[in-house]
Amino acid sequence: MLRAALNRLIGMLTVMAIVVTIVFVIVRVTPGDPAAVMLGPDATAADVEALRQRLGLDGTILQQFVSYVGGILRGDLGQSIFLGQPVTTALWLRAEPTFFLTIFSLAIATTVALPIGIASAYWRGSWFDQATTTLAMFAASVPSFWLGLVFIQTFAVGLGWFPTSGYGGPYSSLGERLFHLALPATTLGIVSSALIMRFTRASMLDVLNDDYVRTARSKGMSEWRVVIRHALKNALIPILTVLGLTAALLISGAIVTETVFALPGIGNLIVSAVLRRDYPVIQGALLIVAGLYVLVNFLIDMLYLLVDPRVRY
Amino acid sequence: MAAIATSTQGHNPGLLVRLLSRPTAAAGLVAIVLIALAAILAPYVTPHSPTQLSIANRLTAPNTVYWLGTDELGRDILTRVLHAGRTSLSVAFSVVIVSSIIGIVLGLVAGFFRKADAPVSRLIDAMMAFPDILLAIALVAALGASAFNVVLALGIVYAPRMARVVRASTLVIRELPYVEAARALAVPTPVILVRHVLRNVTSPLLVQGTFIFAQAILAEAGLSFLGVGISPDIPTWGIMISAGRQFMNSASWLLFYPGLAIVITVLALQLLGDGLRDLLDPRLAKDI
């Protein structure tokens, strides 16, 4: 098992190294000089040169790469050009809304998707199964920003139940701030529930046909216990995988949702960085998000090794 | 869409008939054909022009003349939705082509050559670690915003999904007797790859391509909405929604109908993709 864990660790580090390389390369594919592009046509040659140095674009490609990797290893993701603060600080200061938005939407998605997924697998082929599967497909077809706008129009402007946008004032309580997340989290939760539902259904279908479920039934065990105690327990591992990966991928939804609801989170920071061509922030965000995804993937793999004795490759 | 219909016919004469015998897949296919036709024939479908201003009719609610209402400059929304569909559909279709080309090359190399498998697979894993919209906006930010760069960026973003499917099929096909026979007959490797392997991965490619088509429509709309996509002068569904935000409270039809067009198109593609997957690749149908 130790060997398997070590193999996974090496695999994870390799993928991480490629992620770093991709992030490094992205800025270098900019046609022309990124520093000149950022400063615009009125910049002087001295300004451009100074920015090139700040961005780490001076020296050979190899020197640039070494200094970039060195920075990452020291926890230095560079300086934001427009915010005048380190990228790590800029990301950290905006982490709270994004963190709560992710947690909330995942909670909403799971609460909706898990029971529906289990039920539709149990009543496979029934009208309930067909209706919920179609509904999930429908949810996956809705652009999250459009759903958000429709929600604002209906529940915030029309009915006045929720705030239209923002994250409360600087002195508002945590409760008030979280209240501002109700609509964005529901939007994101609905869109991501589709994937979780389909995975739960597929995972449950797999185990419901297994021998031990048949054995449990033949012992005269109640259906509830068969489904929850025996089937769900074993179906949970793949479901956990998709939950973990959805959590990491929610940042993608957060980029759009935070823009719609004007939430001062990481997604919003990324969009403004892209519009202002603040490359260090874009690179830092890419690195953190992809790094989190790889890490979550690795942790799930480790979890498999620990809880499932059949996984020993 | 016509391309998919023709290629499915060419691939397997009974496929289209079998597809049409499934109610949901048939609904998806019919809907997507109608949407594509409406977009292609947009100038002949409605009597209005997408650019003609009519200040007297600005922000008119849906009525018998303007079925879906008009925008802030008095332009007909239905006409603009149809014209925007041309851009959205052709961008998404081009994304499928670009991601297929990159994905086929990566997938064939990883699946066929044992030594290349580990490095290429790790590259695919690393690319899959970036959320699609995030990687796409970063690439567009680096390359510059234009229709070509949006297609290229989304093509790169979705290529790993294509590559995984091609790799998985190639791994199986590589071991089949006819590939072994071709090798024994000293058929050059590129010929084996194209004639024997690639031909047999068309089914999973078609299925995956349909899903990527759907995802690309959503992603392109997202990029346009964020203002990092195609130039705002060219109407796409995402740009129409973004522009309609200003009038959200007084004229909600401005953003409602372009959004509905996206939902219907993506849903139709997903239904079609599900049907194709069930027919062409029953093994995959179990996974999701």
Image (tube, grey):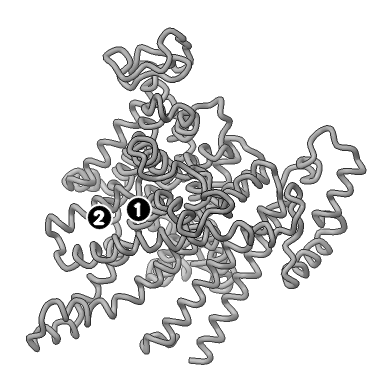
Q: In this image, A276 relative to B149: left or right? A: right
Q: Which residue is mark 1?
A: A190
Q: Is residue B265 visible?
A: no
Q: Report the quarter where the C terminus of chain B lies.
A: bottom left
Q: Quadrant of the N terminus of chain B?
A: top left
Cα separation between marks 1 and 2 = 29 Å
Displayed quadrant of residue B9: top left
- Say the numbered circle drawn on residue B82: none
Residue A111 shows up from this direction:
yes
Q: Where on the picture, by quarter, is residue A125?
A: bottom left
Q: Give the residue drawn at x 73%, y 43%.
A: A31
- Secondary structure of the residue carrying tag 1 is helix
Neighbourhood count class around disc 1 (C-alpha, 10 Å): few under 14, some 14–19, many 20 upward: many
Residue at 72 percent across and 62 percent down: it is A77
Tell me the subunit letter for badge 2. Answer: B
Residue A58's place in the image compared with B150, above or below, is below
**In-image side of B124 versus A22 (left or right):** left
Q: Residue at x 7, y 86 (%)?
A: A220
The x, y position of residue B22, in whole percent, is 18, 48
Instruction: Give the residue drawn at x 48%, y 91%.
Output: A1
Badge 2 crowding class, 10 Å Cα cut-off, few under 14, some 14 to 19, many 20 or more, is some
Q: Quadrant of residue B106?
A: bottom right
Q: Which residue is the site of mark 2?
A: B279
**Left or right of A32, for residue B40:** left
Q: Could you tell me the amino acid type at mark 1?
A: Ile
From the viewer's perspective, is the residue at label 1 or at label 2 nearer? Answer: 1
Share a chain, discs 1 and 2?
no
Q: What element does badge 2 sit on?
A: helix
- Residue nearest the observer in this picture, B24 or B103: B24
